[in-house]
Amino acid sequence: MRILIADDHVIVRSGLCRIVSDAFAGATVGEVGSCSELRECVRESSWSLLVLDIALKDQNSLEVVPELRALRPHMPIIVLSMYGEPQFVVRALRAGVAGYLTKDRAPEELLKAIRSVLGGKRYLSETVAGTLADHVALVGSGTEALHELLSPREYEVFLLLAAARAVSEVAAQLHLSVKTVSTYRTRILEKMGMSSNAQLMRYALQHGLVR
């Protein structure tokens, strides 16, 4: 068994590797910290499963999932994320991941997810499944949300702007340039038909996207 861990935080990545290695005796556990490293690693070697942080430092991970699936169509992917909002979960599932759980879950649940996905099943943590069910009910009612028009990275930037973060703070947190974040902000405002961060904040509060 060969399990690959992709997370840009060294301490988190090391902890995940230890958890997986201790639980699966004899398994080969690899690690990478960026999307560029991930592409190269998946291209060069076959893996039984990938545990993927949703936001690696050089790119939003969901944007590379289709490419990874094309390279290794039989490699299931579990997304491990600090975001539990349905917009992220829906995008991940549409991209083709087999599992999704948030980083606040216990290590035992990650191992449960790995075993489930290796057994050919999907896995969603209980809280994620609950928010996803609410989202499906909302969409089924015919209510269209403007934030659904955003790409994964745009949605990530949108949430931070809506939480009253300055462009420089967003850039630092997502490891992007200020110019790039400003470009994303312009796209977000255009797609959502708004003209200011204040409108983004009001919208996010009304839709329960920030607190």
Image (spheres, grey):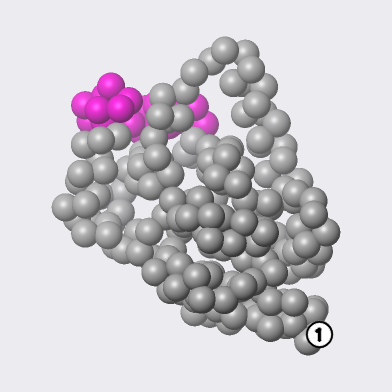
Q: Position of residue 139 (x, y in %)?
A: 59, 21
Residue at left 69%, top 83%? 28
Q: Position of residue 170 (x, y in %)?
A: 30, 54
Residue 39 sits in quarter? bottom left
Residue type, label 1 = Ala
Question: Camera-side residue: 198 or 192?
Answer: 192
Q: Position of residue 184 (x, y in %)?
A: 26, 43
Instruction: Please determine whether, in this image, residue 199 is positioned above or below residue 18.
Output: above
Residue at left 53%, top 61%? 71
Instruction: Please determine whether, in this image, residue 104 is positioned above or below residue 87.
Output: below
- Residue placed furthest toward the top: 142
Examine the structure image and report whether residue 203 is included in the region drawn in magenta. yes
- Label 1 secondary element: loop
Q: What are the residue bounds of the magenta stretch?
A: 189-208
- Residue placed furthest toward the bottom: 26
Question: Camera-side residue: 96 or 104?
Answer: 96
Left or right: where 26 falls relative to 184: right
The quarter in which the N terminus is drawn is bottom right
Residue at left 61%, top 43%? 93
Examine the structure image and report whether residue 24 is included in the region drawn in magenta. no
Residue at left 20%, top 44%? 183
Instruction: Please determine whether, in this image, residue 6 is positioned above or below residue 88.
Output: below
Q: Which residue is mark 1?
A: 25
